[in-house]
Image (cartoon, coloured by chain):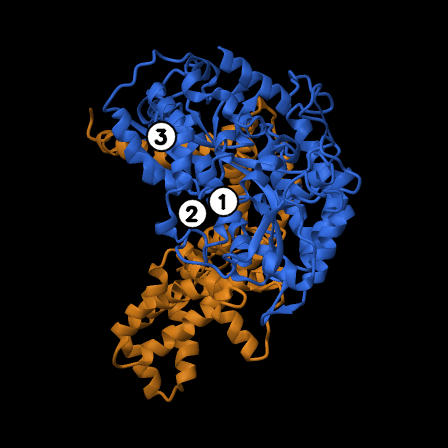
Chain colours: A orange, B blue
């Protein structure tokens, strides 16, 4: 074998392994998305019918809106709170390590556990949140926080924000702490205020990190399943049914394997398109 | 290297990856086992390990504590695994689809039997029962229970492990204080007056009253979708004489949906009762309703029979005493005005049964376990096991006639005679049809019932959506426009006859 071909053959096992883990399941799902395959019924080829059913399904449309609304809101809130938290911690001279360690705690809790914790906190009569809201004159609806469409959605947002804001804060904090101090000091010597230092020096420098953190969080939020499963089961009605929960029901509860395969493809494609649009307008546009 | 060669390497890699992944899937990860349906020779291999998988419902706990007795008696080791409702189904189907022998004994919810049986995943038990008729004593099993939990297309696929009906649980002290006549415990009593109108009247009477310092709700509903709300609502549906399809389970089968005919009235009743329930019950699961009754501020609860004993505990399977111990009683379900015993069924039947995986390598040992778990002796022990551990006895979901007549058990569970009578007016296949696509239909039903409960949709609109979506799914699966598959007259009477035939060999 000549020396030019050798490197390609050396990396062949890795490529095969990669394909087995990534491309094969996608091809598997793609193939089954063209079948009518429901456990208990005869399997048959139906062309694009599953895709048509997915796109025209009111459940899918609702789940898409719920997911995008949820992802957009939580990412915005978490970025805002995470940035403020990171700026505050970066400004503290002592105890940064301890605060960072405390910040890691919510992230280390499994989402399903976070869901159980908040479900108990929201519980009518016995839940602390329910009680505190009543005390401050904002009584939750009679059917409870998770029993009402609007407040159930808010309840999920609060759970997610509690768990993932520290993640954003830590990423931004790391970026803030790695900024070159000479530029900041030079600006201060030139008479720049704290706000001006933040607005014109720190923010542009940490922008790529913020964009990256936002993208990572969006991808996670887009796939939210655990807290929905534990707290609301997609209800009341379908008010909190996310794409992942919808996919779980179709694939693993009802075993509509063909339909669920098409749904997987559509959900993945939407994610890829959204992320690429985001990358085009943020990270790549800035040349970072 | 030129681009063409790169493409070639990648193409080779893809082909090898696909081939290897397929091979791994079919030959390595999943050692395929040929399904067999013929009972093996009646030889128990000592030292064999069988895996039993099931939901952690009440039956699971006492049976777990008795398993060492089984292991000692048969020399078979049992890996006894308890998982959640959805996981039970998911684990079983994953093993079945992969033809894996990892599960020997599988717990089956009543609606899954048809699906598992039609797919060839369960071993029919008729030959085993006939062979071991003296040990199994098939005519001791309650036909209505076998019909609901185990019977499909003329065969018995599983043996019932825990049978549930839906009875009225009410606060006898509250009834006495408000001067309300207690509902009947037997059809031999004055029964005609115990109608749905009366039930609703009682709920309204109790609601809002403060008794001994406790402000009462008339009743408690269950709203979590899909399964819990469907379980609750279908009791109202069957209680009013409703059904899902034009002709099922009686032959010839016709799956044209008629669920809307009595369904609307059943949903109206459900929504009315919700007005007299804790508002948060819209998100209640099965056991939430029982736990709420146990807290002591609910007047009447119509719910699955395990709650007749579960409500003695402060929470689901938490040792201790609830607020209603000694203060409640159990009665028959209400009926429509003018109804007589022998008219349409009025009680939902549900529960769990054990079946043998068609891919098990230890079918005879699995069968030994099922025989043992469903036997009179084991079930009686389960019923009398846990007073000290849980604070009260925690299993009365018996599947055999003889257990409902046992004086020791009646002393502990005084509602057993009522439950026994109620089996005769129950039908699990009318309330929740055992067809392979049940789960899909339940998902549709649960969603719209819950939306109606949340006030997002009217009763009429809910049923328009339900019927439209039912029709679509039924058409996709060839149940409509005309069901061309084989029908059979699937009634408790047919099952009773079948059990007698098995008993006679």
Q: What element carries label 1?
A: loop
Q: Distance between the residues labelled 3 and 2?
A: 65 Å
Q: Which chain carries label 1?
A: B
**In this rendering, do the residues under marks 3 and 2 share a single chain?**
yes
Image quarter hosting the N terminus of chain B = top left
Mark toward the start of the polypeptide (2 vs 1): 2
Nearest to the eye among marks 3 and 2: give it. Answer: 2
Circle count: 3
Q: Nearer the viewer, residue B271 or B394?
A: B394
Could you say where residue B133 lies in the image, as x and y percent from the top left? 44, 16
Q: Nearer the viewer, residue A34 or A118?
A: A118
Check disc 1 and report the residue beneath it.
B413
Nearest to the eye among marks 1 and 3: give it. Answer: 1
Mark 2 vs 1: CB contact within 8 A = yes
Check disc 2 and report the residue beneath it.
B393
Q: Is mark 3 on a helix, strand or loop?
A: helix
Q: Nearer the viewer, residue A254 or A97?
A: A254
Q: Distance between the residues labelled 2 and 1?
A: 8 Å
Could you say where residue B424 lies in the image, as x and y percent from the top left? 63, 32
């Amino acid at each position: 074998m000549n020396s030019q071909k050798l490197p390609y053959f050396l990396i062949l096992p890795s490529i095969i392994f990669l394909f087995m883990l990534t491309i094969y399941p996608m091809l598997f799902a793609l193939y089954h998305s063209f079948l009518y395959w429901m456990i208990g019924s005869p399997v048959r080829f139906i062309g694009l019918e599953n895709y048509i059913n997915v796109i025209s399904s009111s459940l899918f449309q609702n789940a898409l809106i719920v997911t995008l609304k949820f992802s957009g809101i939580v990412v915005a809130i978490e970025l805002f709170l995470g940035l403020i938290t990171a700026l505050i911690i970066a400004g503290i001279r002592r105890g940064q390590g301890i605060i960072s360690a405390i910040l890691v705690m919510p992230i280390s809790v499994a989402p399903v556990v976070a869901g159980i914790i908040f479900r108990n906190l929201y519980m009518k009569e016995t839940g602390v949140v329910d009680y505190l809201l009543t005390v401050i004159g904002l009584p939750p609806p009679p059917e409870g926080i998770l029993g009402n469409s609007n407040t159930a959605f808010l309840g999920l947002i609060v759970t997610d924000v509690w768990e993932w804001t520290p993640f954003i804060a830590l990423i931004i904090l790391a970026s803030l702490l790695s900024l070159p101090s000479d530029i900041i000091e030079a600006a201060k010597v030139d008479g720049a205020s704290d706000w001006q230092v933040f607005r014109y020096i720190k923010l542009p420098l940490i922008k790529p990190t913020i964009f990256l953190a936002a993208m990572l969080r969006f991808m996670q939020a887009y796939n939210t399943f655990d807290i929905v499963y534990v707290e609301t089961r997609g209800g009341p009605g379908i008010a909190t049914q996310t794409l992942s929960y919808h996919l779980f029901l179709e694939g693993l509860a009802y075993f509509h394997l063909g339909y669920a395969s098409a749904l997987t493809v559509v959900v993945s494609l939407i994610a890829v398109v959204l992320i690429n649009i985001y990358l085009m307008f943020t990270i790549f546009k800035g040349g970072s | 290297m030129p681009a063409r060669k790169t493409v070639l390497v990648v193409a080779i890699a893809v082909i090898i990856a696909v081939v290897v992944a397929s091979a791994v899937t079919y030959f390595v990860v999943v050692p395929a086992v040929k399904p067999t349906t013929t009972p093996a020779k009646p030889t128990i291999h000592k030292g064999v390990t069988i895996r039993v998988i099931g939901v952690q419902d009440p039956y699971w706990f006492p049976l777990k504590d008795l398993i060492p007795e089984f292991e000692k008696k048969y020399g078979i080791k049992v890996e006894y695994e308890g998982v959640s409702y959805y996981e039970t189904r998911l684990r079983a189907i994953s093993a079945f689809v992969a033809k894996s022998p990892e599960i020997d004994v599988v717990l089956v919810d009543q609606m899954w039997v048809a699906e598992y049986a039609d797919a060839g995943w369960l071993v029919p038990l008729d030959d085993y029962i006939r062979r071991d008729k003296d040990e199994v004593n098939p005519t001791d099993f309650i036909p209505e229970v076998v019909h609901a939990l185990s019977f499909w297309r003329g065969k018995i696929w599983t043996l019932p492990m825990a049978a549930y009906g839906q009875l009225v649980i009410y606060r006898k002290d509250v009834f006495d204080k408000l001067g309300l006549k207690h509902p009947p415990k037997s059809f031999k009593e004055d029964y005609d007056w115990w109608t749905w109108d009366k039930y609703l009247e009682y709920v309204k009477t109790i609601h809002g009253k403060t008794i001994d310092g406790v402000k009462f709700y008339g009743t408690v509903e269950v709203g979590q979708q899909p399964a819990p709300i469907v379980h609750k609502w279908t009791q109202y549906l069957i209680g009013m004489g409703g059904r899902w399809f034009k002709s099922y389970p009686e032959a010839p089968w016709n799956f044209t949906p008629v669920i809307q005919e009595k369904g609307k009235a059943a949903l109206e009743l459900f929504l009315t009762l919700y007005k007299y329930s804790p508002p948060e019950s819209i998100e209640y699961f099965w056991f939430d309703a029982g736990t709420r009754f146990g807290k002591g501020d609910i007047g009447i609860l119509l719910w699955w029979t395990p709650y007749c004993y579960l409500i003695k505990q402060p929470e689901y399977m938490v040792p201790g005493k609830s607020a209603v111990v000694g203060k409640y009683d159990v009665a028959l379900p209400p009926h429509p005005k003018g109804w007589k015993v022998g008219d349409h069924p009025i009680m939902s039947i549900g529960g769990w049964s054990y079946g043998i995986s068609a891919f098990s390598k230890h079918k005879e040992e699995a069968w030994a376990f099922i025989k043992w778990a469903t036997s009179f002796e084991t079930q009686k022990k389960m019923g009398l096991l846990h007073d000290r551990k849980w604070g009260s006895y925690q299993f009365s979901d018996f599947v055999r006639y003889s257990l409902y007549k046992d004086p020791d058990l009646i002393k502990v569970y005084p509602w057993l005679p009522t439950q026994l009578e109620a089996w005769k007016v129950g039908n699990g296949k009318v309330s929740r049809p055992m067809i392979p696509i049940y789960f899909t239909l339940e998902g549709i039903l649960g969603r719209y019932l819950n939306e109606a409960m949340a006030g997002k949709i009217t009763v009429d609109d809910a049923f328009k959506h339900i019927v439209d979506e039912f029709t679509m799914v039924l058409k996709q699966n060839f149940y409509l426009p005309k069901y061309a598959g084989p029908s059979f007259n699937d009634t408790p009477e047919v099952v009773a006859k079948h059990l007698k035939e098995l008993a006679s060999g």
